[in-house]
Amino acid sequence: MKRENMMDCITVLKHGGTENLIMTKVQIPIIDDDEVLIEVYVSGVNRPDILQRKGLYDPPKGASNTLGLEVSGKIIKIGKKVKNLKVNQKVCALTHGGGYAEYCKVFFKHVLPIPKGMSYIEAAAIPENFFTVWYNIFYIGQIKCSETVLIHGGSSGIGTTAIQICKLHGCKVITTVGSLKKQKYCNKIGADLAINYKKNNFVEEIKKYTKNMGVDIILDMVGQKYFTKNISLLKDKGKLIMIAFLSGSVTKADLTQVMTKRLTLTGSTLRPRTNKEKAFIAKNVYKRYWTALSKKTIKPIIYKIFNLKDADKAHKLMESSKHLGKILLKIKKEEKK
Ligand SMILES: NC(=O)c1ccc[n+]([C@@H]2O[C@H](COP(=O)([O-])OP(=O)(O)OC[C@H]3O[C@@H](n4cnc5c(N)ncnc54)[C@H](OP(=O)(O)O)[C@@H]3O)[C@@H](O)[C@H]2O)c1
């Protein structure tokens, strides 16, 4: 293989600890007619990357084995069937894997222009969180501005996005977090009530705050440990939307309230969806949030940026849960204007 066709990339040597994340040289991806090749400046780190590294999450059929579900960068090649994008355009994208690398190929309808005035760093923190939150709370959940939403994991990339866009919509937002620092920060970015679940009983706190009414929608990433509590907190016709199971997915529960309160239990995963479904989400996220992102009414919350070669450190930080917002990998330096 010619040297000019090779790129730096983080490879998972074998499933397990962070020591298995190794910088290697691999071939630059070859694009199909409906894809673009992005020179990656920044790549987002997400929890599913950790699960994939450990061997607990297999990439869907046809997806890249390389980690990395979102990038920002510059388009350097365009397939014959690609519309509305051009070479040298600054973009961010939801990838089908392959983000922890110097170059990444992406289906063109999952690529969006960087919001006006935004850096590559901020833009890389948008796709995975905005796509997931809009789809689950707004499309599946059909949340109304008069409703109250409970967002677990409020300090996560997903949580900080959900808090901001639910407030932008006019909803009342309650969130749970694991420290006083995270509690204060979630209040600062708009949460009406942030509860430190390590110090307080969040069920009692929420019942007190809502005068025993409960909440309309819950976005949950915890699963097992919270299932019964979540059910008890939902109002009649409330919706529990599950996007992850950080404490486990198997549980024993009394389901009576699902019936008596006519609850909806639902959820989704983003990555295995079809190109068409993800293009639909991309279009909606662009239409609804790009102006607010350009005006900085809402913004991606960035916690720490590592160099690509330090992907192991980035994973360690995410697994510690000490972070608040996004962890990113810098691959190429932004040019000075
Ligand atoms: N279904 C989908 O389509 C989809 C898409 C993207 C992400 N996700 C999932 O959404 C979750 C958030 O993603 P992210 O990338 O934003 O992750 P993240 O920033 O790492 O946030 C996860 C947060 O959850 C809290 N947490 C961890 N373990 C917990 C436990 N056992 N009980 C209670 N809280 C716990 C931690 O905060 P505290 O200190 O507050 O505990 C942690 O910061 C992940 O689980 C991810 O896999 C799902």
Image (spheres, helix red, strand yellow):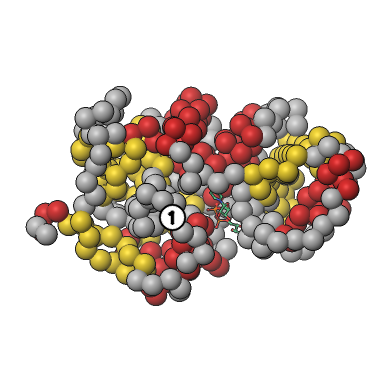
Percent x, y of residue 249: 67, 59
Q: What residue do we see at 11% from left, 54% from top? A: 4
- For the point 51% across and 64% down, the residue is 56
Task: Give the camera-side residue of 214 and 155.
Answer: 214
Q: Quadrant of ligand 1?
A: bottom right
- Figure check: 168 above or below 59: above
Foreground residue among 333 and 128: 128
Which residue type does callout 1 highlight? Pro
Residue 181 location, x and y as percent? 64, 58
Q: Is residue 43 above or below residue 279?
A: below
Apparent side of residue 16 relative to residue 264 in the rendered image (left or right): left
The image shows a total of numbered marks equal to 1
Report the quarter where the C terminus lies: top left
Question: Disc 1 marks which residue?
Answer: 59
Residue at figure coordinates x 71%, y 53% from the top left = 176
Q: Identify the residue at horizontal 50%, vertical 57% (top origin).
A: 48
The residue carrying pointer 1 sits among few (fewer than 14), some (14 to 19) or many (20 or more) residues within 10 Å by Cα, namely: some
**Where 319 falls versus 155 (above or below)?**
below
| Quarter where residue 264 is shown | top right
- Residue 244, how many percent across, how many down? 61, 53
With 183 as the anchor, is 216 left or right in this view?
Answer: right
Instruction: Work out whether residue 334 can be spotted.
Output: no
Query: Which corner quadrant of the image does residue 331 belong to?
Result: bottom left
In this image, 263 relative to 33: left or right?
A: right
Question: Which quarter of the image is occupied by the N terminus?
Answer: bottom left
* Residue at the outermost front position: 61
- Location of residue 12 by image quarter: bottom left
Q: Is residue 145 something one can see in this rendering?
A: yes
Q: Find out if the beta carbon at label 1 lies less than 8 Å from the nearest ligand 1 atom.
A: no
Element class at badge 1: loop
